[in-house]
């Protein structure tokens, strides 16, 4: 057998120890591997995003958008901001077979999920905040929560993209605010509070009552509007920058 010489590839060497779960709050750039439509036991609807960085670190991020009675949650603003950052005008529920962890069998199994194909493979920047908590067995755990999104190359945030700005003025402010509290601790059992808040937590985590809404300005009175899925967005026109 003929063997070829092997020469050190520095970038390849760096990748050997890369990967694993995202552990710390901060700024991340990567790819949306999947964006799944989900429904909680309470009927609250939202999305679960599988995100992977260029160094193969990953996180599953949950954002609740609509209560069971159709009332929009603040998470809908975060999803709209994300769409502006990835240049997508809408998400179409589409059946797809995916390998996911099954808590009953305690293993990964192939399931039919409802996903948004428009978001799959899109590049984006995310600001993530770490949340520490204790599971039902008393073991310490953590998860990464959606704080804000930005355009990968320009670092423009949603409002700047829609206003056709060319300088990223909001991103440094958002990052500074996040880094004041890159890690939070979950207090008590607040599943319902989380789903009512719409923030980017999993099913058993609390909401950030005072977290800023970067990208879409004042949301006062939003809760009195018709359900988000049944309301024509003012941005869905030919004047969008994407």
Image (tube, helix red, strand yellow):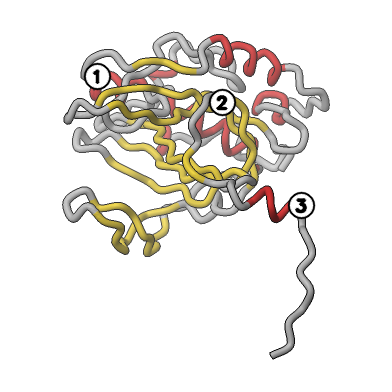
| Residue 148 disc label | 2
| Residue 10 disc label | 3
Query: Mark 2 against mark 3, which lies toward the viewer?
Result: 3
Q: Are marks 2 and 3 in contact (CB under 8 Å)?
A: no
Horizontal and vertical percent position of residue 198: 38, 25
Query: Mark 3 against mark 1, which lies toward the viewer?
Result: 3
Mark 1, residue position: 190
Point out the residue furthest to the bottom here. Answer: 1
Q: Is residue 242 left or right of residue 208?
A: right
| Residue 112 disc label | none
Element carrying mark 2: strand
Mark 2 or mark 1, earlier in chain: 2
Point out the image quarter for the C terminus: top right
Whole-angstrom CA distance, mark 2 to mark 3, is 33 Å
Q: Is residue 117 left or right of residue 185?
A: right
Dot 1 alpha-carbon crowd within 10 angstroms: few under 14, some 14 to 19, many 20 or more? some
Q: Is residue 65 visible?
A: no
Whole-angstrom CA distance, mark 3 to mark 1, is 46 Å
Asked whether 145 or 9 is in front, the reply is 9
Asked whether 234 or 41 is in front, the reply is 41
Element carrying mark 3: helix
Mark 3 or mark 1, earlier in chain: 3
Q: Are marks 3 and 1 in contact (CB under 8 Å)?
A: no
Residue at the image position 26 percent from the left and 56 percent from the top? 107
Residue at the image position 19 percent from the left and 37 percent from the top? 41
Whole-angstrom CA distance, mark 2 to mark 1, is 22 Å
Horizontal and vertical percent position of residue 78: 51, 28
**In the image, is residue 200 above or below residue 4?**
above
Element carrying mark 1: loop
């Amino acid at each position: 057998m003929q063997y070829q010489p092997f020469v050190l590839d520095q970038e390849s060497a760096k990748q050997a120890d890369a990967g694993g779960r995202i552990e710390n709050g901060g700024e991340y750039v990567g790819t949306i591997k999947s964006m799944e439509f989900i429904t909680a036991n309470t009927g609250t609807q939202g999305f679960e995003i599988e995100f992977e960085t260029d160094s193969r670190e990953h996180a599953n991020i949950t954002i609740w958008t609509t209560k069971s009675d159709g009332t929009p949650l603040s998470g809908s603003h975060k999803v709209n901001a994300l769409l502006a950052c990835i240049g997508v005008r809408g998400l179409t529920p589409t059946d797809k077979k995916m390998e996911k962890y099954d808590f009953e069998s305690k293993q990964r199994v192939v399931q039919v999920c409802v996903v948004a194909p428009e978001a799959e493979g899109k590049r984006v920047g995310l600001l993530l905040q770490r949340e520490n908590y204790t599971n039902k067995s008393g073991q310490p755990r953590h998860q990464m929560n959606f704080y804000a999104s930005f355009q990968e190359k320009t670092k423009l945030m949603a409002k700047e993209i829609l206003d056709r700005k060319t300088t990223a003025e909001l991103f440094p402010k958002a990052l500074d605010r996040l880094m004041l509290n890159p890690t939070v601790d979950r207090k008590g059992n607040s599943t319902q509070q989380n789903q009512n808040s719409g923030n980017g937590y999993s099913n058993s985590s609390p909401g950030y009552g005072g977290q800023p809404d970067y990208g879409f300005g004042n949301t006062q009175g939003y809760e009195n509007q018709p359900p988000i899925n049944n309301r024509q967005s003012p941005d869905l026109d030919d004047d969008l920058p994407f």
